[in-house]
Image (cartoon, rainbow, N blue to C red):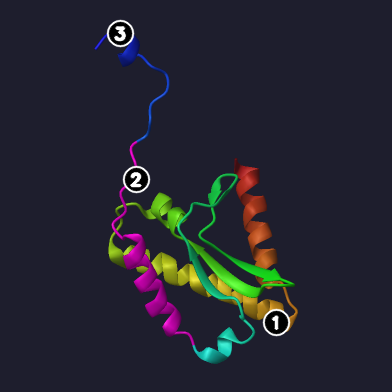
Amino acid sequence: MGDKTRNKKYRILPKRIASLSLDEFESLATALIDRIPERLCSELNGGFLLLPEVKKDGDFYIMGEYVEDEIMGCSIILYYGSFVQLLEDSSPGEWEKELWDTIVHELRHHLESLAGVDNLVREEMAELEAYYKKH
């Protein structure tokens, strides 16, 4: 190889290898969601959705989100690609813990919305404010 190819500024980054495939992630998510008492999923008429992509907001990967839509209803979306970016080759136990924490977090948004409170949103805003003060 000549000098021009060795000294390129830009390189294609290697594809991240995940210890859990999308299919394995989906099976794990289904098993965890099945643990949730049905009464806590009341009015979650859009259910749980799993998308393969990465979602990012500034410095942060979005692992999941709670969505309220006038037409589509209420749903919880999980972003497999974001889990891959964050966890890569972490152990299956670490994937399970992060996935469970995300499901519970988004379910809390749903339940607080039903109750007409926004405590979790306030907590998130305080955490973001503290983060950006440091950075």
Give the CA distance from mark 3 to mark 2: 28 Å
| Element type where label 1 sits in the image | helix
Residue 25 visible at all: yes
Residue 89 placement, left or right of 85? left
Residue 109 visible at all: no
Residue that carries the numbered disc 2 in the rendered image: 16
Give the CA distance from mark 2 to mark 1: 38 Å
Give the CA distance from mark 1 to mark 3: 62 Å
Q: Note whether 132 is above or below 79 in the view shown.
A: above
* Residue at left offset 68%, top offset 58%: 125
Which image quarter: residue 9?
Answer: top left
Residue 2: % across, % down: 27, 8
Residue 14 placement, left or right of 71? left
Residue that carries the numbered disc 3 in the rendered image: 3
Residue placed most toward the observer, 16 or 133: 16
* Residue at left offset 36%, top offset 66%: 25
* Residue at left offset 57%, top offset 91%: 39
**Is tag 1's residue or tag 3's residue first in the polypeptide sequence?**
3
Q: Quadrant of the N terminus?
A: top left
Give the magenta part as a residue range.
14-36
Residue 44: % across, % down: 61, 80
Residue type marked 2: Arg
Which image quarter: residue 115?
Answer: bottom right
Residue type marked 3: Asp
- The 10 Å Cα crowd at callout 2, few under 14, some 14 to 19, many 20 or more, is few
